[in-house]
Image: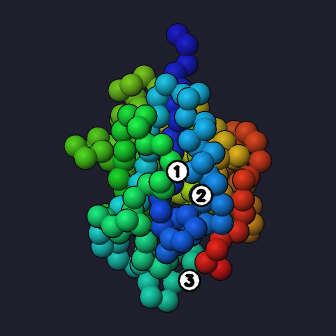
Amino acid sequence: MKSRRALIVVDVQNDFCEGGSLAVHGGAAVADAVTRLLPEYSTIVATRDYHIDPGAHFSDHPDFVDSWPPHCVAHTDGAGFHPSLNTERFAAIFDKGAYSAAYSGFEGATHDGVGLADWLRAHEISTVDVVGLATDYCVAATALDAVRAGFDTRVLLNFTAAISPATWSAAHDALRAAGVRFDGDLLYTGSTTE
């Protein structure tokens, strides 16, 4: 049986793009690039940070490692997808982090409570390509959990942007050690907030 592939678009949201509260340099360019990529896939899903009260994940004095400025608060413009991102072909959206940090899309669920791994299996997906923001945090966490869940996993680096070279280097090593494959070169590295 032919392997069925899906594209997972991770957290391409206003607060993670230029002008947002936790902007990643190149976020808007990632939104544009991902939109151009969508026609290559028949199955596309997206994840979305959707925080209500994530506890210590939010801080007025963030360390930018475990704590961050408030971002992607549920029902705000910051939590919305970037306007350059075409969302019409998303088969499902997985909200994550209501009451926790939740870096991985596999911690999210649809509005009716279906988790990402269960959704992919129900649609007979065996291979996933992961794109979005930020490469060294939510993209990496999603890709690692995809491998742990048994999916053949690839990160398309041309459709991602990382927060910093140091955190990307550590994430890259962890992903490679886990068996994640890579395609392309990182679009941008460097946060606009640092």
Asked whether disc 3 touches disc 2, contact meaning CB atoms under 8 Å apart, the reply is: no
Could you tell me which residue is drawn at 59 percent across and 58 percent down?
28
Which percent across, then down, holds residue 163? 65, 67
Q: CA distance from mark 1 to mark 2?
A: 7 Å
Which percent across, then down, holds residue 56? 40, 79
What residue does disc 1 label? Answer: 84
Residue 127 visible somewhere in the drawing: no
Could you tell me which residue is drawn at 72 percent across and 63 percent down?
189
Residue 91 visible somewhere in the drawing: yes
Q: Is residue 43 above or below residue 90?
A: above
The amino acid on which the numbered mark 2 sits, given as a three-letter code, is Ala
Q: CA distance from mark 3 to mark 1?
A: 30 Å
The nearer-to-camera label among 3 and 1 is 1
The nearer-to-camera label among 3 and 2 is 2
Q: Secondary structure at mark 3?
A: loop
Of pointers 3 and 2, the one earlier in the residue sequence? 2
Extreme top residue here? 1
The amino acid on which the numbered mark 1 sits, given as a three-letter code, is Ser
Asked whether disc 1 touches disc 2, contact meaning CB atoms under 8 Å apart, the reply is: yes
Q: Secondary structure at mark 1?
A: loop
Res. 25 mark:
none
Asked whether disc 3 touches disc 1, contact meaning CB atoms under 8 Å apart, the reply is: no
Q: Tell whether 12 sits left or right of 70.
A: right
Of pointers 3 and 1, the one earlier in the residue sequence? 3
What residue does disc 2 label? Answer: 28
The amino acid on which the numbered mark 3 sits, given as a three-letter code, is Asp
Q: Tell whether 118 sits left or right of 43.
A: left
Extreme left residue here? 112
Q: Tell whether 184 sits left or right of 46.
A: right
Res. 63 mark:
3
